[in-house]
Image (cartoon, grey):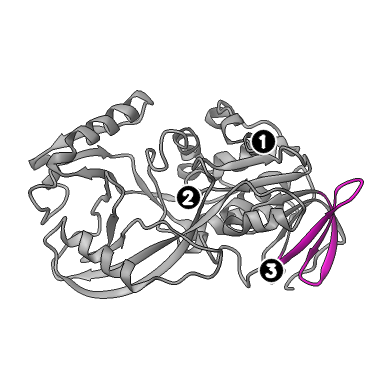
Amino acid sequence: MTGTAPSATDVLIVGAGIAGASLAAALAPWRRVLLVEAEDTPGYHATGRSAAFWHESYGGAGVQPLTRASLDALDRPPADFAEQGFLTPRGALTLGRSVDAVAVDAFAAAFSEKGVAVDRISGAAVAAHIPGLRPHWCEAAYEAACRDIDVGRLHAAYLRAAKRAGASLVTRAPFRRARRMTQGWEVEVGGATIRADLLVNAAGAWADQVAAASGVAPVGIQPRRRTMLQLRLGVPVPAGLPLVIDIGGAFYFKGESEGRIWLTPHDETPVDPHDVVPEEIDVATAIDRLQSVVDWPVAAIERKWAGLRSFAPDRLPVFGADRHEPRFIWCAGQGGFGIQTAPAIAALLAAQLGAPEPQGAIGWIDPSPFAASRFG
């Protein structure tokens, strides 16, 4: 273990990725918080491998309210949290072929009804955004508000804020098991045993395993492998290329720097939780799909990596007290949208655990669709 673990705390949070770190920052001013992380550094698995962006339609209509409500906190954070915001302009195209026109129409209409700024474009207007676009990819919904997120700086800011408020962080402290006591929990992490009033499961891909080791029924959170590539191209594709997402969910790519892009085949291969690496078949699939969309020669694969995206059965995040064990708190199932929704989820869950109710846009959100109690 690295760091000093107290013998007792009000709230013990398992997992120091973006979910655990943001919750610790929101809750530490009001409760004693201990954040425990199995790895050498926080954010090693999903958070540290994200190609994150703030994209209001990403994750679907059920996730969109959390994304929208998180915008101000990401773009204009309080001065004592960060000197500047975490977002930079990007823009996004949800792209389809001529045969996908009806699907793109439906996508644009559905999100426009929710107040998302979506422009339905076709033909030359689409091609103007993507040099070298093949002609049959001619239908799109454009969201100018899409932005990149500086994930590393955001995660570090949450950890700093939690520390300033009195939270403790212990790394190299894998969760072993937890036993329910008359009042709270006796938790084994690393080589230590810690008493906690509340146990928060922010363990990402390991969330169901943490539940089972605590005598709590899993809710069916499934880790899925996602592959990412950084490609150097043989053409001068601009760094400001929009985020381009296939309407059918078969790929997305975005500019990284001049002549370079980040690309994924948008794979969601079910796996057991572990330190995942990219599979060559997924790398080849990604490039094949890209070249069916644009006429860009690939000069080199400069980087390739994989991360875990974890989903509940209904693909909505899971946060709040367990249905049968009210002192076991879920904060998991955040898929690929956990970073863009972290401010809202952290504030809403912290309010359930002793922090004040959030104000502004976050305060208007009904958390009940995301409650862990929805799972029997």
User: Residue, x 68% and y 50% (percent of image)?
Assistant: 24
Question: Tags 2 and 3 in contact by the CB under 8 Å rule?
Answer: no
Residue 171 circle label: 3
* Nearer to us: label 1 or label 3: 1
Residue 81 is one of the magenta-drawn residues = no
Highlighted magenta segment, given as a residue range = 170-197
Q: From the viewer's side, name the closer residue of 258 and 368.
A: 368
Q: Main secondary structure of the magenta part?
A: strand
Q: CA distance from mark 1 to mark 2?
A: 37 Å
- Report the amino acid beneath label 3: Thr
Q: Secondary structure at mark 3?
A: loop
- Report the amino acid beneath label 2: Gln
Q: Secondary structure at mark 1?
A: helix
Question: Tags 1 and 3 in contact by the CB under 8 Å rule?
Answer: no
Residue 54: name its quadrant: top left
User: Which of the two discs, 1 and 3, labels the residue nearer the N terminus?
Assistant: 3
* Nearer to us: label 1 or label 2: 1
Q: From the viewer's side, name the closer residue of 308 and 297.
A: 308
Q: Secondary structure at mark 2?
A: loop
Q: Which residue is mark 2?
A: 84
User: Residue, x 79% and y 68% (percent of image)?
Assistant: 4
- Report the amino acid beneath label 1: Ser
Q: From the viewer's side, name the closer residue of 141 and 217.
A: 217
Crowd around label 3: few <14 · some 14–19 · many ≥20 (10 Å): many
Q: Position of residue 25 (x, y in %)?
A: 66, 49
Q: Position of residue 294 (x, y in %)?
A: 14, 57
* On screen, residue 120 above or below 34: above
Answer whether residue 62 is visible to the viewer in this image: yes
Answer whether residue 160 is visible to the viewer in this image: no
Q: Which residue is mark 1?
A: 373
Residue 26: name its quadrant: top right
